[in-house]
Amino acid sequence: MLRSQLLKFSKRFMATATQDSKKELEEITKSWASNSKSDSFKIKYQQSRRAVLNGVGPYGPPSLRSRRAKLQYMSPLGLDEAFDSAYEILKTKSNETYKEIEELDTKISQTKNVNELEELNNLKNSKLVQAEIDNPEVRFNFTYHDKINNDSSIIDYNEPVYRELKKKHWEDYSQMLLMQRLEQLGAIPDTLPTLNPRAEILVKFLNHTTINRWIEPGKLLPTNATSYPPSFKIQEYENVDPKKQLYTVLVVNPDVPDLENDSFKTYLHWGLSNIKLSNFNENFIGPKQILENKEINEIIDYLPPVPEKNIPTQRFITWVFRQPESISINLKNRDFDIRSFVEDHGLDAIGGHIWRSEWDSSVAKVRELYGLPKGTVYHRVRK
Amino acid sequence: MVQSRSITPKVKETIPLESLRSTLLLARNPIVTPDLTPFEKVYYNYQEELERRLMWTFPQYYYFRKGTLSERRFVAAQKGPVTKQPGVFYEKGKPDVVHNRERRLKQEIVIPRQETEEGSSLDEINRPVIPNSRITKADEINDITSLERKLPRTLYLLIKDSKLGWRLPSFSIENTSKGLNEVAEEGLRKLGGEAINTWNVSNTVTAVLKFQNDKLVKSDDSSSDLTREYIIKSHILSGSFKPEDSNLEFAWLSKEELKDYVSEDYFNATEFLLSDI
């Protein structure tokens, strides 16, 4: 009895399986505008691509894991027809935009005026965004894949459309969070008067002693974690030329006790200049890049946060600037006036980051590691 | 329809009255909603299906008290979903039934047929609503003189002039005592009878056409021998245009049709006045 049932079931299962595999091979006939050529404008995984463009087949959506859930799924009636119709409309629009881009290209090749050329390039950039922003495959790629550690064959930030999508994503949360932390912790105006954020700056400490993840602005980090220099990711959203643009990174601490003046002074904990990003995807500045790239100038070597006991929490603010020309100075003294430095070199602040440190049990170890003198303990009443 | 306040054209002594004319742009507004584009059709269909699928399960307990005859009738009339049975293989997944409704689908509610007395009007209430056709008889035989054609479009009255061909009805001004709007209205009634009710959008003119020897010239032309046609905008509210003179040809046309009737210059000069819907 049981055996016969099993046999029946397996037969039925086989039947459905062969039927499904036939349907699964249904070809994808849709394709976006003929000029959209980048691989990142296509969904990589064929089953997902089929489900997005052809609609959910008889085997259910690939995003669901279990066979039962896949069978049970029913997409709303009329969805596929509405999708197809909308796709055609958006595709014709995109084709028109690509035609305009072709016209712009011929115009760009004819113009020689620098200002006009820049204007035309910006216009072309916005048209390229417009041509692809409604592509469902682009939207799918951006929504369901890692946006920070991006795979450039899926999310390619060299394409203006992905930069635009990421910019909006950043503005929705991370940019506001950064500005809130910078302002509430007084990094603005204690270091620089203000910031017009145009690039996303991500900070990470890459070493075995600590958490290997992007640091939320304003986080209080243990001294152990910050014992080796941080790594940065500079995600530009504006249409700059990554092959020419140079960047400066300054890590400053405005909370160093200044006993003579009964106040605080600013220390420069780390300074890098002449950083070049090869493109919009490879924009990570870690120890490997610093060692390999001889053009990067270290203004001053890294001094890890070693806060003294009994002083308030220390703020460590990372500022990232676009520099108009290369800077090749080296400093010895850590006393630093960031405002005059920025003014002297004509730096343009595009982004920042902040983390905080306070005394903990690992301070002594880090001091020993860097050969620093023993720390002072501050008391309420000065001795 | 004589307006109490009207604007009389300021005519200098030097300009002869024959060079001024009052033209009427008489429109019949759309009677039904505009035709849906193919995309709009499938989009609204999808939205409706989605809304029905996400609808609340019909609260049967609220409308029919438990154990009553009406409840029993209602339940009997329902088709009911496929229920989940042990040991059964369901090709489209196990049914997800709550409160006698398949939650993955929209709920179809059947209203039980009433046993009614003879001559009761209840059957008539339950009869399905069948909308009238959007395509009328006039559409089928392409009767351009009928007002009941092209229901979703705005139609404009055109008249065939023996000399100048098809154009908007235009009237000469005899004296300065009447405003341009009054001239146009009276002219229309002289042509098409009193059985027409119109409503003027404004007493002021909406546009001016300039002619030189019956040929359209540019709007910035300022020659001394120009004939000016002042266009008054108006809607037909009821009645119809029935010409007294049976030889007079007239037509009610939409913007696209109008293009084929009038000359190219004339269409280009009046295009901006005409509605796309």
Image (spheres, rainbow, N blue to C red):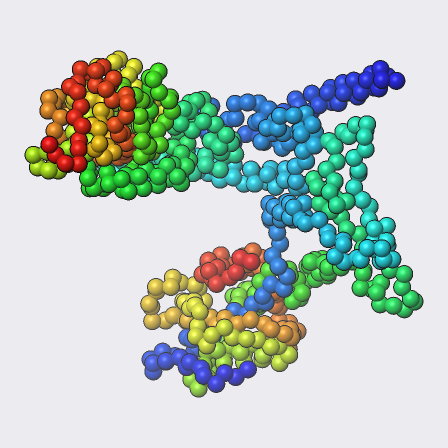
Placement of the C terminus of chain A among the 4 image quadrants: top left
Q: Is residue B94 visible?
A: yes
Kindly give the residue lying farthest to the left in the view shown. Answer: A260
Picture quadrant of residue A241:
top left
| A323 sits left or right of B14 in the view | left
Left or right: B168 in relation to A20: left
Q: Nearer the viewer, residue A122 or B169?
A: A122
Q: In the displayed structure, would residue B47 be above or below residue A49? A: below
- Above or below, B164 against A38 in this view is below
Q: Position of residue B33 (x, y in %)?
A: 62, 59
Viewer-proximal residue among A315 and A301: A315
Kindly identify the residue that appears in the image at 58 percent across and 31 percent down: A52
The picture quadrant where one finds residue A203 is top left
Snapshot quadrant of residue B87? top right
Give the camera-side residue of A270 and B213.
Answer: A270
Image coords of residue B163 (percent x, y): 53, 67
Do we see residue A37 in this rendering? no
The residue shown at (52%, 36%) is A91
Picture quarter with the N terminus of chain A: top right
Please say if A177 is above or below A212: below
Q: How many marks?
A: 0
Above or below, comparing residue A26 to residue B175 in the picture: above
Return the x and y of residue A164 as percentages of the image width and height: 39, 36
Q: Residue at x 90, y 61 (%)?
A: B115
> From the viewer's perspective, is A374 left or right of B48?
left
Question: Residue sitting at 56 percent across and 56 percent down?
Answer: B256
- Return the residue nearer the eye: A163 or A216: A216
